[in-house]
Amino acid sequence: MPTLRPSRPQDGARIIDIWRRAVDATHHFLAAADRQAIDAEVCGFLPHAPLLLAVDADDVPMAFMLVVDGHMEALFVDPAHHGRGLGRLLVQQALRGHPRLGTDVNAQNAQAMAFYARLGFVETGRSPLDGQGRPYPLVHLRHAGAPSASAGAR
């Protein structure tokens, strides 16, 4: 049974390993030069970010999530642990604190799109570029359990 805990400085190398393995397994659409540039950015940021980890019985991270102001900025599961409910567990934890949880997904990542749809996220918009201005379209999602912005307006 996995447990959830905040990341620690000593988790940095494992977090980067999870990110690389997950991206290599799911982001086949990235150009090699972009993959390298993103890797450099991630290595400078991710080990110091306030992540929530799913860890095994030996306290080894298997997945991580970053939520900032009700927006899930990152959710990555080590491919060796795909299909075990770790992503779902992390998202459910985020929804407890952020019922209007939103996230962005690369439009080319069909696996992630299907995952979020199964969890009740709906599309709220699209952008032609990713957050760094690269040509990887994003789909903006919000959890369907959240009331719409216009629900209270009459």
Image (spheres, rainbow, N blue to C red):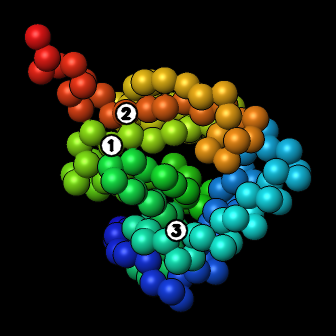
130 is higher (above) or lower (below) than 6: above
Q: Residue drawn 24% across and 32% down?
A: 146
- Label 1 neighbour load within 10 Å: few <14, some 14-19, many 20+: many
C-alpha gap between disc 1 and disc 3: 22 Å
Q: Residue drawn 43% across and 50% down?
A: 72
Q: Which residue is mark 2?
A: 142
Look at the image and tell me whether residue 110 can be seen: no
Q: What amino acid is labelled 1 in the image?
A: Leu
Quadrant of residue 22 within the rendered picture: bottom right
Q: Earlier in the sequence, mark 1 or mark 2?
A: 1
Q: Earlier in the sequence, mark 2 or mark 3?
A: 3
Q: Which residue is mark 3?
A: 62
Q: Which residue is mark 1?
A: 101
Look at the image and tell me whether residue 51 can be seen: yes
Instruction: Report the front residue among 72 and 57.
Output: 72
Instruction: Report the front residue among 142 and 92.
Output: 142
Q: Is residue 107 left or right of residue 102?
A: right
**Which quarter of the rendered picture does the N terminus lie within?**
bottom left
Q: What amino acid is labelled 3 in the image?
A: Met
**Which quarter of the rendered picture does the C terminus lie within?**
top left
Instruction: Report the front residue among 141 and 113.
Output: 141
